[in-house]
Amino acid sequence: MIERAVIIGEPEIRFSSLDQKKTGPLEVSREMKLKDIEKAKILEALEQAGGKIGGRNGAAEQLGLKRTTLIQRMKKLKINIA
């Protein structure tokens, strides 16, 4: 989005002029820490994928991550699938 604004040559880039596509129902408050946001997005993707981590339509694909990267982040954030 920012790249497009720079290419178009706008002298100022304002948040209101950028595409604000919402990827999901996650509501982010100012008090949330980055790790909390990451954990919420991972849990949301896992729910949408029916608990499937890798493969087609898995949580990793939805998040644009490799399966191994997602597993590593899940371990770091103490997210268990049982």
Image (cartoon, rainbow, N blue to C red):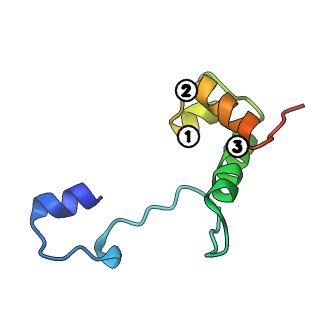
Q: Nearer the viewer, mark 3 or mark 1?
A: 1
Marks 1 and 2: CB-CB under 8 Å? no
For mark 3, what is the residue?
A: 48
For mark 2, what is the residue?
A: 66
Q: Give the quarter of the image for residue 33.
A: bottom right
Please identify the quadrant where the N terminus is shown: bottom left
Q: What's the CA distance linking mark 2 and mark 3?
A: 17 Å
Q: What's the CA distance linking mark 1 and mark 2?
A: 9 Å
x and y, in percent, of residue 47 in the image: 75, 43
Residue type indicated by callout 1: Leu
Query: In the displayed structure, does residue 70 sit left or right of residue 64?
Result: right
In the rendered view, would you say 7 is above or below 12?
A: above
For mark 1, what is the residue?
A: 63
Residue type indicated by callout 2: Lys
Q: Give the quarter of the image for residue 63.
A: top right
In the rendered view, would you say 20 is above or below 60?
A: below
Disc with the residue nearer the chain's start (3 vs 1): 3
Residue at far front of view: 76
Residue type indicated by callout 3: Gln
At a point 13% along the width and 71% down the height, the residue shown is 10
At a point 29% along the width and 74% down the height, the residue shown is 17
Residue at far right of view: 82
